[in-house]
Amino acid sequence: MFALAEVAEYPLHTNRSDNGADSVFLLSRRQTSVQTSGVVEEFDSAFDAVEGLKTGRIDSVVGALPFAPSTPCALTAPLSFTRTRGDLHHSGAVNLPSAKVAGCKPSPVEHTRRVRGAITRLQAGELDKVVLARTLAIATESPISPTALTRKLISLDHSHNGFCVDLSPAGGKYRGRALVGSTPEVLIERRGDIVTCHPLAGSIARHPDSKQDEAHAQELLASTKDLSEHKFVVDSISAVLGPLCRSFSAPSTPELLRTPQLWHLGTKIEGVLADPNTTALELALALHPTPAICGTPTDAARDHITGTEDDRGFYAGAIGWCDRTGDGEWMVAIRCAEIAADGLSAKAYAGGGIVASSDPDTELRETSTKFRTILSAFDLAEDLAE
Ligand SMILES: C=C(O[C@H]1C=CC=C(C(=O)O)[C@@H]1O)C(=O)O
């Protein structure tokens, strides 16, 4: 389907059973993309997948880690694995079924009430930061093809980011479901002994007028609230990744990163692994959940989230791949939607980091802006804050 220069392809394991020939994984990134198909083995435990890679039983693993570490993973050792240079964008119209927003959970009023409740706890010093999210139900007239939605998202994003993950390996209600999105946030990338992270936290909406858009970007760079929200993420990643590296650098001030909808604060973190046998998947497990999608302190923030929200499933988890050399890339699973097994509905997710100085209405608007990544793929542009 995609005519691109291949940089790695592992052979088909025709000696193993292919019990899921149409299971597809796609990760489109500007530098290196991955496409896989088929199933050699499924894993609902990431530790079993790591063991499979380390013993040489499997050549690669792709899939998704959930937000809550106690819930099943959706990982697949694929039948074919193709890594290509460049993104997976290709021109050509993508037709998605006609769609409508069928509801949101919690309601905008309830979300602001939850944000207010979190701010009370933050101001009392019980937490430093917590990320609260809400969901949007999208209903379609005919089934959504996960790969078609992914291609549309790839075409709409100027970096051509996009992913599609079959969630079936998590079993139960996840059989036949897919997670599709266009995330800008790199949890961890490993190439040999070099590791990089690109955490994002702190956001402001883009503006259609270029002067005002630039003013928004500068406002974000100077926002003490957003800078503090961002610092929690960089500090947490540094505390976990620093000790695993023989050299490590994390700039003290963030830079701007833009998506079609938002400006974000982002920091490029780099290190050289002390033990090059540590795989990208193990690094993702060590880093997840960062304060970009959970909070600080981690356990208190996670308890607050699980006591407040419904199960996040794979939203705010991680999606990615790891090969037999240990190289791989894991992205934070945001700006995404979970497509139902019958394809007739999707649940989109959007969250935002709350600190003591947050404003509930601004936080609500930020989640509405984040939903636009998925909504724009369906040509929907509702004002969700109303
Ligand atoms: C949690 C989300 O975004 C994270 C990534 C970038 C900026 C964020 C923020 O400003 O709150 C969030 O940390 C989401 O999109 O659902």
Image (cartoon, rainbow, N blue to C red):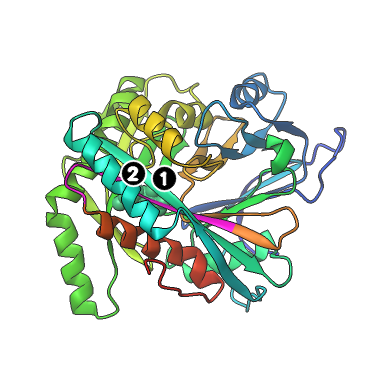
Give the vertical position of 35 relative to 51 (above or below): below
Which class describes the residues within 10 Å of circle 1: few (<14), some (14-19), or many (20+)?
many
Q: Position of residue 114 (x, y in %)?
A: 34, 46
Q: Give whichever of discs 1 and 2 has the lower sequence position.
A: 1
Which residue position is annotated with label 2?
A: 199
Q: Is residue 375 above or below residue 173?
A: below
Quadrant including the C terminus: bottom left
Q: Which mark is drawn over residue 164?
A: none
Relative horizontal placement of residue 97, taking residue 214 as reference (left or right): right
Helix, strand or loop at mark 1: strand
Magenta residue check for 54: no
Residue at left offset 16%, top offset 56%: 221
Q: On the image, numbered disc 1 is attached to which residue?
A: 186
Q: Is residue 174 left or right of residue 249?
A: right
Identify which amino acid the numbered label 1 is placed on.
Val
Give the residue displayed 15% in from the left and 63% down from the top: 218
